[in-house]
Image (spheres, rainbow, N blue to C red):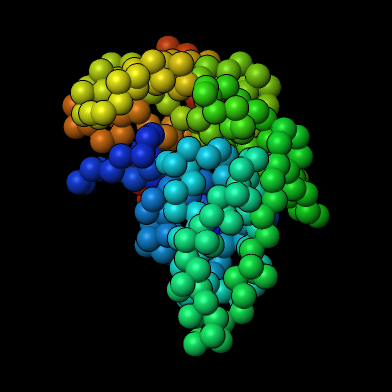
Amino acid sequence: MDEIILLGTKGGPAIRQGGALPTASVLRLAGRTMLIDCAIGAARSAVEAGVGLLQIDDIFITHLHSDHVLELGPLIYTAWTTGLQRSITVYGPPGIAEYWEGFLASMAFDYRIRLADEGRPPLTDLVQIKTYGPGEVMRSDTLIVDALRVDHPPVTDCFALRFATAGTVVVFSSDTCYFPPLGDFAKGADVLVHEAMLTDGVEALIKRTPGASRLREHLYASHTRAEDVGRIASSAGVGHLVLNHLLPADDPNFSQADWHAAIQPTWAGPLTVGRDGLRIPLS
C-alpha cells in the first residue's frame, strides 16, 4: 500500500523523555520503500512501524543538519549487519559523499572484523552515493523525483523534494523559511509535508535549549510560521497538508488545537498535525 509514515516529527536535534524524535519519514510509492531524512532514532522507529531495514530501496537526505542525517550511516550499517545483500542508493546534497566516507572510517575496526570473520559482502559494494542539486534527482519507469533549493540559512544546499508518479504527487518541504516558490513546486500535489513553527512556542523552546545564544535568530530566519505554511499550501492547491518538523513538538503547553488555530486563517483544506508513527495512506 502506498503511504507516508512519519517516524520522527520534531524540529531540531534535541531529544527529551517522552517527546517526539527528530525528522525521518518513510514514503512507500511506485513499488519502492524510501526513507526521507534520517535523524537519530530512525532505524528503531522504522522497524517498530513494520518497515524492515532490508526493505529500504532509497534514502533521500534533504540537507546535512544533524537532525536530518545523524543516523544515516548507523542505519545502513545496521541493515548490513542484519543481512543486507542488495543495493541501497543514497541521494544527498553536496557533502553527502564525505559524510559516508567519514562514517566508514569511524567503523573501520568493526568493518574489517565482520568482513573477515562473518563473510559479509563488502558494504561499499552495496551502497551507492549520489549527490544531487536543483532539478531532477532520479527517474524510473514509474517515479520521478525533483528537487527545489529552499531558503534555510545558513545552509545553502537544502532541498524540497517532489515525488511524482502517474497518479500521485507527494512533496516534502525540508527545512525552510517562508519561501513562495515552494508553492509553485508543490502545485497540485496530493500531499504536502511541510515543516511548521508556532511563534507562541518559540520563546518556551529557547528557554529549554541552553547553550545556543543565537537560536532565536536562527529559528525566525530559517523556519516557517504555521500561518505561512497555510499560505504555501493554499497557493499550491494541494489536496492534503501535513505538518512536520514541528517547533515545538514536545511542549505540553501546546496541543493540536494550537496548530489548527494558527493555520486556520490561511488554509481551509484537510490538515494533519504530524506525530511520531502516524501513517497517511495515499490513494
Please, is residue 53 above or below residue 203 in the view?
below
Write the residue at 54% across / 55% down: 102
Please say whether residue 226 is visible from this viewpoint.
Answer: no
Where does the image place residue 159, in percent across and percent down from the top left? 61, 33
The answer to which image quadrant residue 217 occupies is: top left
Please, is residue 215 above or below residue 17 in the view?
above
Write the residue at 47% across / 66% down: 107
Write the residue at 47% across / 42% down: 68
What count of labels does the image hold?
A: 0
Please say whether residue 70 is visible from this viewpoint.
Answer: yes
Write the residue at 46% across / 30% down: 195
Where does the image place residue 132, in percent across and percent down from the top left? 70, 42
Please, is residue 265 above or below residue 53 in the view?
above
Quadrant location of the N terminus in the rendered image: bottom right
Q: Residue furthest top?
A: 265
Where does the image place residue 82, in percent across and percent down from the top left? 47, 75
Q: Nearer the viewer, residue 71 or 104?
A: 104
Specify whether 271 is left or right of 29. Answer: left
Q: Residue furthest right?
A: 141
The answer to which image quadrant residue 237 occupies is: top right
Q: Nearer the viewer, residue 99 or 63?
A: 99
Q: Nearer the viewer, residue 203 or 229?
A: 203
